[in-house]
Amino acid sequence: MTAEKPLRRMAAPEKVILPLQQHLGAPNRLVVKAGQEVFVGTLLGESESFVSAPVHSSVSGRVLRIDMHLTPQGKSQLCVFLENDGRGELDPGLASPGDWREMEREEIRAAVKRAGMVGLGGATFPTHVKLSPPAEHPIEFVILNGAECEPYLNSDYRLMVEEPEAVLEGLRIIMRAVGAERGIVAVEDNKPRALERMGELVDGEELQVRRLPTRYPQGAEKVLIRTLLGREVPSGGLPMHVGVVVSNVGTAHAVSRFFRTGMPLVERVVTVTGKPIREPANLLVPLGTPFEAAIEECGGFSSTPGKVLMGGPMMGLAQYDLRVPVLKATSGIVALSPEEAGYQTPDEPVCIRCGRCVDSCPMGLVPTFLASCAHFGKLAELERLHVDDCIECGCCAYICPTRNPLVQLIKLGKQERAAARKREAAVRKASQGGGNSGGA
Amino acid sequence: MEHRLIVSVSPHIRSAEDTRSIMCKVIAALLPVTIYAVIVFGLSAVWVLAASVTGALLGEAAMQKGRRMPLTLGDCSALLTGLLLALTLPAHLPWWIALIGGAVATVLAKGMFGGLGHNIFNPALVGRAVVFVSWASYMTGSYAVNRAAEAAAGRPVVSIGLANTAAHNALQRAVDVVNGASPLAAMKVVYDPVGALAVPAVQASNYYKPLLLANPWGCMGEVSALLLLLSGLYLIAAKVIDWRIPVAYVGTVAALSALAGRDPLFYVLAGGLLLGAFFMATDYVTSPISRRGKVIFGAGLGLTTFLLRFWSNNPEAVMFSILFMNALVPLIDRYLLPRPYGWVKKGKEGRAEA
């Protein structure tokens, strides 16, 4: 719907709301006060903890207040409310960290951390952590993930077509940071223009472009690594365990931009699309922009929406209040019509054992068995069937002809198993403690 | 911008395929052979079809009413069961037997196990098995021949008894061949040293054409192997069934027949093999859920059918093979699941430290 819509930068709205934590990991500490003046790129929150990423202002203006606000994850979180003065003045402290070709790995990583980079595919894992594999896991390949994570979304595609040089430079920076000799740009075969543009710019030796079959969830990193290299990330492991680092196209683009201009992560590409959206578009959106402002930028709704998602239709999060802000994790804002959104799962789902979920599972699991074990609370059986290897891509529930809520039940089963493990650990600890004191 | 938005867990879209559309595709695939059977066998085929389907629908409805469950005749699964059962019956069968068969299929084999998705055995084949053991004489080809002969002669025909010696038995079977016994029974005679003497003119290849185009000996669904093949290929192309079960099943039968020195093509075309392989063995509920399991299941079916056809006096090799292998499906599903991603090297290095 938006594949051929060029990127368009949207003006920052009058107010932006920036949650203090937009990454997976340790929470950030607030470094600004209400009333303080800020510029584009001014630091708002940071943490000394390794697994964290700072948050920067996306507008110039003033801190209105610091308060709890609903975020797209469905929870209220501490947010910095900023008033935009419309001047877009850059923070005077912003400067390129230098020529990355001259920099040591450690310096590149430290700079990437300062820039607040996280995986822009949606998982928001801090990028510098990914760039710091321990010495016992040498990295052979960096894979640039150009397989869009979900249908409907085109943010990575547009960057590859419109700014291929910046994307490839980002890839080279990441390769240097992890000491990888080779980079692979992986693009799905439904994006011939991206394949072409990328192909023109790589040498085929150090960097190569690989065509992937278009098949969701091709963009899931474990699936991607298997397709490209025939390697499987061990269960519970990370790509680095098979000598690979996978980076999202948007992340690479943001990294190269930071090294050129010193601009930290304050905006991202958001695909705003779906039947109820009047003029679907690929927008460059300042972080913290409320969803409703981004939708308004696309002409608003042309018909009543049934659902509005952050992310794509397979793994996206359904929103109930459109005042939530665009986050580093917001790859798309997808609206579905009431007809598209309104399917019901049956009260008493039946499995006709057609095997479609089994054939569709990219992780080789048996979703229907997992779901029924979760339904009946058989936690040990869930473990035997490798419930923790589920990547929650949703293929099973999508394909199920009896409309079984398969992935939904599996997610529930995972949580229950995790909770049970926690309880067991607590009980073990308590009983050990008791034993000790009894002995003393 | 106030909107009432639906909130639910992902995924937010669904494939259009549902149970009903799958069942309807299988029914559509069976229509050519059903219509052709009516053309070949005439009006009696219609009665058997109607009675079998009615029995299956009544049985399903009665079970669901009785168990106070919602009526789900709309999913077309009971309709398909009735149709499949009818296709495994001879066209000359009295209608009331077909009706009972249909009801047995959905009540005994399906409803009593908990309904759609819970049965262990293929409902249509259980229906057929019950009919077969209860009214065996109505099921055989000689019943039809005798009825035709009676009609022609206007009086009952008494079959000629012969002394019970091997040579005489072979001769008796040879007579049956002439009288219209099923091709498989005929080939038993042909491949028998004594029988071969009795009917030297009969070759397996003589049967290719009638089996492919218009088979008068078998049940309704066996009327044309060619149509079954085309319908089966359609179901595979439409991704309704997986190719593994029919290919493994038919392939195993062909390979074992060839190894036994018999004509493999004949054994593929004859009897209920194609009907069973494409439409019965591929029943979702009663076949393994994984691809690996499906291959084993198909090969097991082929082996059982081969054994029953070559060493059993019972003519119902395909039916009993499928029912037998149905019983092994839970076992196959327990041990032949797909290999999960990331568990390549078992034990030592399989799992990284999390």
Image: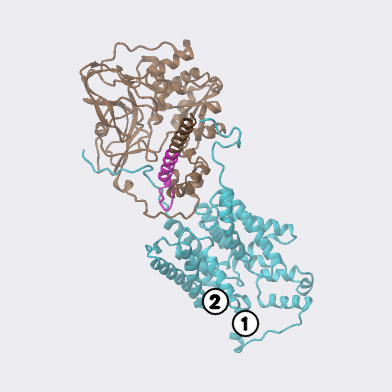
Chain colours: A brown, B cyan
Q: How far apart are marks 1 and 2 (CA)?
A: 13 Å
Q: Do the residues labelled 1 and 2 touch (CB within 8 Å)?
A: no
Q: Which chain carries label 1?
A: B
Residue at numbered disc 2: B93
- Of the image marks 1 and 2, the number of the one nearer the N terminus: 2
**In the image, residue A418 above or below residue A7:** below
> Disc 1 designates what residue?
B146
Give the residue drawn at x 76%, y 82%. B163
Residue A86 placed where, x, y %?
A: 22, 20
**Up-down relation of residue A398 to residue A15 (above or below):** below
Residue B271 position, x and y percent, is 62, 66
Please identify the quadrant where the N terminus of chain A is shown. Answer: top left
- Which amino acid does the dot numbered 2 rest on? Leu
Q: Which residues lie in the magenta part?
A: A397-420
Q: Position of residue A421 (x, y in %)?
A: 46, 38
Neighbour tally class for label 2: few under 14, some 14-19, many 20 plus, Cα within 10 Å: many
**Residue A137 among magenta residues:** no
Query: Could you say which is closer to the camera, residue B159 or residue B58?
Result: B58
| Amino acid under disc 1 | Asn
Give the residue at x 43% y 62%. B76
- Confirm whether circles 1 and 2 share one chain: yes
Element type at marker 1?
helix
Is A415 placed left or right of A299 in the picture?
right
Query: Dividing the picture into quarters, in which one does residue A21 lie?
Result: top left
Is A368 placed above or below A215 here? below
Main secondary structure of the magenta stretch: helix
Q: Which of A129 and A226 is in front in this view?
A: A129
The magenta stretch spans residue A408: yes
Identify the chain of the residue marked 2, using the numbered disc in the image.
Answer: B
Q: Please state if A335 lies on the left or on the right of B126 as rendered.
A: left
Residue A118: x, y in percent? 40, 25
